Amino acid sequence: MMYRKVPITSILATVLLISLCNVKTYAQKYWQQRVNYQINVKLDDQKHELHGDIIITYHNNSNTALSEIWMHLWPNAYKNDKTAFAIQQLENLSRGFHYADESKRGYIDSLDFKIKEQKVLVLESEGFPDIAKLILPQTLAPGDSLIISTPFRVKLPNSFSRLGHVKTAYQITQWYPKPAVFDASGWHPIPYLDQGEFYSEYGNYDVKITLPENYVVGATGVLQNASELTFLDRLSDSTKKIKNFSEVDTFPASSTTYKTLHYLQNNIHDFAWFADKRFHVLSSEVELPKSKRKVKTYVMFTNKYAKYWKDASKYLNDAVYYYSLWVGEYPYNYCTAVDGALSAGAGMEYPMVTVIGETGDGKTLDQVIAHEVGHNWFYGILGSNEREYGWMDEGINSFYENRYMKLKYSDGFMINKKNRNAFTKLLGLHYFPFGYELYLTQQLSSSQGKAQAINTHAEEFTYLNYAAIMYTKTSLVLAYLEEYLGVEKFDSVMQTYYNEWKFKHPQPADIQALFERETGEKLDWFFNDIINSKKDIDFKIANIKKVNNQLQVKVKNTSGIAGPVLISSIDKKNKAIESYKTQAFYESTYVYFDSLKAKKIVVDPGYIIPESNRNNNSVRLHGPLKKIEPLRLQLFGGLNRPDKTTLNVSPAIGYNTSDGVLAGLTLYNNFFPFKKLEWTVLPMYGFKSERMNGAAQIIHHVYPERVAEIETKFSLYSFSDVNKKNEPYGLEVYNRFFKTSLGTEVTLKPSSARSRISNKLSYRFVFTQESLNYNYRDSIVGVDYSTETPNFYHQFKYNRANNRAINANSFMLMYEYANNYQKLNKEYHHKIFAVFKQKINYNNSRKAILIRAFAGTIFANASRTNASNFFSLSGNNDYTYDKAFFDRNNLNRNQMHELDGAFKANTFMPTQRQIIGVNVKAPFTSRFPVGVYADAAYSNEKQKINGSTLDLGFGVYMPIVADVIEVYFPIFYEQRLYSTSSYKEVIRFMIDFQLLQPQNLKRSLQLF
Ligand SMILES: [Zn+2]
C-alpha cells in the first residue's frame, strides 16, 4: 500500500521508538488502553452532513508516558483521489471513486481539538489526510487519563465503501475522530481502507443522535428513549401485518420536527448507525442457550428485498443462538441487522448492528446475516488486529459461518438434492460433498501458483486472495484442526479463548499459546506451517505392504509443511472399515490397518484437508494400475474428480472455406482446479475437404520461487487453406498447412503479489509446412504434382504489461530468425517488431481510447523469396499460423487480426520490409458498442498506384466484445492494387477464436 511505500518519517520514528521500548515492556503483564466516548451529533439530510461534538476520555493503562495520540479521521479517506483508500480502489480495479466529482466525495472538518480548554497541536500525516497526530500539551503518565474534545462536521460521501448515503438512506460508519490503538507493539495509525479492516480500543459509548422524526434508526448500543422503543414496536406490529410488500421504494419527505435518540453501551470498540425513512421493522427476541437470558433483535429493511427480509428475524436469532452456543454467550442485550446501500462486500459488521447489501435469496441472506452477526464474536468481542491478522476475525468467523450453513442447509452435498437439475448433473457436480466450493475457491488461487500465506496483512493480499485465502483457506484449515482435535475439544478450546480474551486484543501468538496450553500439544504445524506458509499440504500413498497380518501403508507428505494425515481403508460398498489420524509429520509416516478386507486405502476420504493434489490420495489393493484412478468421461468439461481420471469431451464445430464445415471433438485432461500438465486434442473432419484436420496442445506450468511462472507449450495444428475442385480439365488443387511449435515463457517475479505489472520472456520454435497438390482428373492435360514449402522460425519475445485500472499499457518486442534448410540456396531473414499499446481512460466505464504504435524491420538475404513473411499493413499476414482465419486461401477478404499494421481497411500490401505507424480506436461512451478508428503508417516499399509512402484510413467500428469480436466500416481508405467492386468487400471483422476457447479462456480470465 501507499502508506508502506511512502512512510511518514514520524510514523517510522514512533514505531521505532515504541519497538525499542518493547524490549523492556514485552515480558510485562497484558494491558490495554481504554477510550470512552460522548458524542452528540445532528444529521442534516438536506446537505448530507453530520454536525457534532465529541468528548474522548483516554485512559493510559500502558507503562509508557504518552506525549502524543494518533487519531483516525477516517471520513477524510473520501477527500480526494490520493488517499490510501482511493489508491487501493484503483488497484482493485474499481474506478468509481477515482472519477467521482467533488460533490460526491466526503471529508471531516471543523475540528478544534482541546484538552482542558487548551488548544491541541494537530499534525496531519503527509499523504494521509485520514490520520492525524495530536501533540499533548503535557505527557500522559501511565495510569492517568485525559479528556480530549472537539466539534466536527462530516460531509457524507456517496456510497463508495462503508460510510455514505444513497439519497436519504444513511450508513454512518467510521465517522467520528477516534484514537488509534496503542498496544504492546506500539501505535497502530492506519488509513481507512476498503480491503483491510479495523483495530480499535474498547470503551464506553454515550451517543446522542438528532435527526428528523420520521427516520428509523438501527444502531450500536442500548436505546434509552422509551418513546422510540415504542415507535419501533409499533412499526414491527404494522410490518407483521403486511401481506404483500409494495414494489415502490420512494423516500418520504423528512419531518420538520426532530428527535434525539440516546444510546449507551459499555465494552465495545466502535459505534455505527443506519438511518432510513423507508425502513420496515421486525422485532423479535432470542433466548441464549446457556444463561437463558433474552436478547432483543431487530431487522430493518426497505421494500426492495422485503420478500427475503420478512424471514430475517429467524436468521438473526439463529446466528445469535449458535455463535453463543459454540463460542460463548452474546454479552449484549440488543442485536440489529439492517438492509443498507453498502458498497464494500455483501455485508458489514459493527458492534451489535450489522448492515447487509443487496441480496438475491433467503439462504444467502441467512448466510450473510450469520457471518456479519458472527463478527460480534470475531471482531466485536475478540478485538484482534484485523488489518494485520485478518484471518483471526474473517477466517475464524468464516469457519463458524460454514458450520452454521452446514447445520441449517446441508444434505451432505455441494449441490443439495433439491437444487439438482440436468445442468448440474451434466457438469458432474453431484459427486462433491457439502462445502466443496470453498475448496475450489481456495484452489482458484493455489492451483495457479498465486497463493499467499494466510497470515498476510490484509492490504497486501491480492483482491482474489483476500477472499480465497484470508477467508476461505483459513476456514478450511480450521476444519482440519477441528477434525484433528475432535469437535468437542476444539469447541472447548475456543470457548476458553473467548472467555480469556473477550474485550481484549488477542494476537496470533496468544491464540497459539492458548491452544497449546489447552490441548497439551505443540501445534506449530498449524499455527506456524499452515498459517504462515503459502503452500498447500499434499499427502501421497507411497506404498502398501502386508506386515505381520497387517497392512502397512507408507504415507508421504510432499508439501514441505507438516500436518496430520487422515486415512481410511474402504470396503467394496465404499464404507470406511478403519480410519486413523496421525500426528503431524514432515516427509513420511506409516499407518497400520488390521483388516485385510479393504478394497482401497484413501487419504482424506472426508475432504477435510485442503490438499493441492487429490489425485494421489487413493490406492486400490487389487488389480492392475493400482494408483491410477479409473477413467471417467465428462461431457463438456467438469471438475476434477479425485477418485477418477477424468477425460473431458466436448463436441467441436468449425468452418473455413477450404475444409468447409468441420466437426469433431475436443478432448482434454483437465478443467479445474488447474493441473501442472494439461493437454488438449482436437481432431476435426472437414466435410468439403473430406480430410481429418485438427489441433493438439500440451501445456506444462511450474511456479518456482525465483520466477513467478514457467509455461512450456507444445502444439500441433493442421488445416486446409486451398481447396478447389471442378477447375478446368478436372483440376483439383489442394493445399494443407501443418504447423508445430515448442516454446517456453518465463513470467518474472513481480515486485509484490498485488503488482499489476508483468514481465515475460519467451522463446518459441515454429515449424510450418505448406503441401500444395495439383491433381488432374483428366490425365492427358497435365501431370499431377505436389510441392512442399517448409519454414523454420525462432522467435524471442519480451512482453511487459501494466494492467492497471486506468491508462493500462503494454510493450512487446520480438526478434525472429527464419530459414529454410531444405533449399540449397539457403534463405533466411532477421525480423524485429515492436508494439506499444496504451489505453486512455476518460470516465468510469471500461471504455478507453486505445492507441497502438508499431514499428518493424526485416533483413533478408537476396534469395529470400517468401514475401509472405514480410510485414503486411492489413492484419492478415499470419505465416506462423497462430490465428484462425475463415478464408486463408484469399487473405485479402474481410477477416483480420491485430497483426503487423492492423489496418482496418484492406491495403493489400504484403511485402513491406519496414513499417512504422499507429492505430487508434475510440469507442463512444454510449451504451452501444460503436466507436471510431483511424490508422496511419509509413512504409518503405510501395506497390501502389499513387506512389505515396503514407497510408491512411479511418472509419466507424463496433467492438461487440472489445479486442475479441469487432467489425469495421471504413469511411476513408486508400484504393489498392485491386479495385473493390462493392462496399461489402471493404467491411472487415476480427474474431479471436483462441481467446474464446474454454481451455485458453480459463487461464486468460482476469483473476486479479
Ligand atoms: Zn466478515
Image (spheres, rainbow, N blue to C red):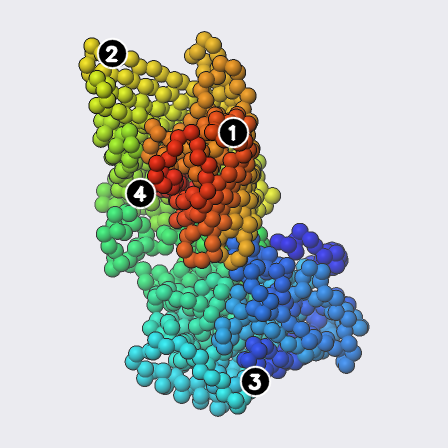
Total tally of numbered discs in the picture: 4
- Mark 2: which amino acid? Gly
Q: Residue at x 43, y 52 (%)?
A: 930
Q: Which mark is residue 210?
A: 3
Q: Which mark is residue 947?
A: 1
Q: Residue furthest top?
A: 824
Residue 790, position as x, y percentages in the image: 40, 18
- Mark 3: which amino acid? Thr
> Is label 1 in contact with label 3 (beta carbons under 8 Å)?
no
The correct choice, above or below, for 290 with respect to 818 in the image is: below
- Mark 2 and mark 3 lie on one chain; the one further toward the N terminus is 3
Where, quadrant-wise, is the N terminus in this rendering? bottom right
Q: CA distance from mark 4 to mark 1?
A: 55 Å
The answer to whether residue 277 is seen in the rendering is: yes
* Label 2 secondary element: loop
Q: CA distance from mark 4 to mark 2?
A: 50 Å
Question: Label 3 CB, ligand 1: below 8 Å?
Answer: no
Q: Which mark is residue 782?
A: 2
- Mark 4: which amino acid? Gly
Residue 612, position as x, y percentages in the image: 43, 42
The correct choice, above or below, for 51 with respect to 547 in the image is: below
- Mark 1: which amino acid? Gly
Q: Residue at x 53, y 57 (%)?
A: 843
> For the residues carrying marks 1 and 2, which lies nearer the camera in this image?
1
The correct choice, above or below, for 845 with respect to 781 in the image is: below
Q: CA distance from mark 1 to mark 2?
A: 41 Å
Q: CA distance from mark 4 to mark 3?
A: 59 Å
Work out whether residue 819 or residue 242 is closer to the camera in this orientation and state it: 819
The answer to whether residue 19 is seen in the rendering is: no
- Mark 4 and mark 2 lie on one chain; the one further toward the N terminus is 4
* Label 1 secondary element: loop
- Which residue, given by chain and number where applicable, does mark 4 sit on? 637
